[in-house]
Image: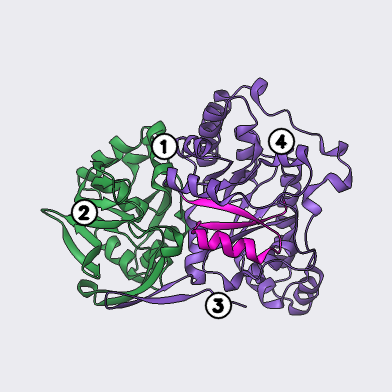
Chain colours: A purple, B green
Amino acid sequence: MLFEDGIVERMWGSSRIRHGTNRLKRGFARMVKHGAVFDVTNAEQAAIAEDAGAVAVMVLDKLPADIRAAGGVARMASVDAIEAVMDHITIPVMAKCRIGHTQEALLLQEIGIDMIDESEVLTPANEAAHVWKWDFTVPFVNGCRDLGEALRRVEEGAAMIRTKGEAGTGNVAEAIRHMRMVNMGIRRLQANLDDPQELMILAREMKVSYELALETAKLGRLPVVNFAAGGIATPADAAMMMRMGVDGVFVGSGIYKSQDPEVRAEAIVYAVANWQDAEKVLEAQSMVSEKKSMTGIDIQTLAEAEKIQYRGAQL
Amino acid sequence: MSKKIGILALQGALEEHESTVKNAARNLGIQVEIVHINRTSQLSDIDAIILPGGESTSMKSIGRKLGLFEPLAERIRGGMPAFGTCAGAILLAKEVRRNKDEPITSGMMPLVNMVIIRNGYGRQKESFEVPISIPELDLKLDGVFIRAPIIEKVKDGVKVLATFEDQPVLVEQGNILASTFHPELSNTVAVHEYFLKKVQ
């Protein structure tokens, strides 16, 4: 199921050109593969990210760790702050909107950012539905905890998926769990590729269409680019996620809540690019000191209500 | 005999080129082996190199640390066929503008005699598709331009194979092919076939 409602046609000289096709939206995500995207709150942090070799930055008002500490309602970043980042760097700029907050998403599209993250890190605005992303020209990335959730977001028009992990904890355990769930789901679909009835039962369990389940089974992976996010704090964390089959990583609080953001950003970029080479990952990990990593939170100590990953519409 | 096609594996859309080049090789009835290149020691072993799309600043940062660009440029200068798309074309350009209004600086591997502007059309909202003709290949394809660069000027020795509104979008300089769009995301393998014919 593909909708093409986000297409804008216009003339360029004597040529008719098309913006916002699914190929362009998913294609943008393809171009950031094997890369690292860093959360930033201002232009200065964005410049550090760009110099370190980040493929993009993600603008928010507060880093996830600070959102967790501050409590209250977390909304999209100030227009000023987003524009300041866009003016300051040349790599792609992403920004977060609240789950289901179509108007925040429209604002971000109007500002002209390169990709919208409809994110559970902000306070969900609609407990029943996510943004209907097919209507947009700008591509979206959405979080997931398992394959069904990932595919439901794809069915709403997400051009890219990321694990939810547990944002702002500096603890990679939940991202690993979510990626394991995605991989297990894909293997289950693949195992039933030749059995339409079993495949349909699985699709119903996952609450997704049969067609998308079949496409995923045939591909043996998500039909869109898939990154890891939520709790990545060190080069080893980033390489660990690459090892599990993600296409790249988002790093939230892990950079600017550490005491060595410049070298850590560079080291994580290097570890993502070279994750298959043990020597190079060691080189990356040696660039950072564990004494300077963000302190982090043991997820076992968090009450269910404090876990960000469960927020937002379930279907 | 099987040809080894390297794909520069610093960052970006490697897998798309990998599948396209394999399909092109099958069409031509030639054997290819794909090698992801991220170490200098691999360079002596390959017969051609593809530089994929992605973020050129990110590739620059990683490639520099690996010391890859000089030895790779040396091999291409020595005649090894190279194909750069989008960010890959930026890496191969002699002269680069970081942005439309910024001054010209020297490219990472100053090989193709052209001036290229990063993000020439603007941000993702300006990314577009348009039909592109390549008369030399007798081919029409969907040009997929994603935060694409603009080739501002081509100089001596550069042949223009395709244009969009009078701007070059696919150029050739001897053993080197460079496009500002993404034939690997398109509906054809013909551009990759054309490239593979250089690898004989």
| Quarter of the figure with residue A200 | bottom right
For the residues bearing labels 1 and 4, Cβ distance under 8 angstroms: no
Of the image marks 1 and 2, the number of the one nearer the N terminus: 1
For the residues bearing labels 3 and 2, Cβ distance under 8 angstroms: no
Q: Position of residue A252 (x, y in %)?
A: 64, 41
Identify the subunit bearing mark 2. Answer: B
- Pair 3/1: label in front: 3
Q: Position of residue A254 (x, y in %)?
A: 64, 35
Circle 1 Cα neighbour tier, 10 Å, few/some/many (<14 / 14–19 / ≥20)? some
Residue of label 4: A170
Which stretch did the figure color magenta?
A: A92-120
Identify the subunit bearing mark 3. Answer: A
Q: Is residue A282 above or below residue A309?
A: above
Say how many tags the image has: 4
Q: Mark 4: which secondary structure?
A: loop
Residue of label 2: B175
Under mark 4, the amino acid is: Gly
Q: Can marks 3 and 2 be said to lie on one chain?
A: no
Q: What is the C-alpha distance between the residues marked 4 and 2?
A: 48 Å
Circle 4 Cα neighbour tier, 10 Å, few/some/many (<14 / 14–19 / ≥20)? many
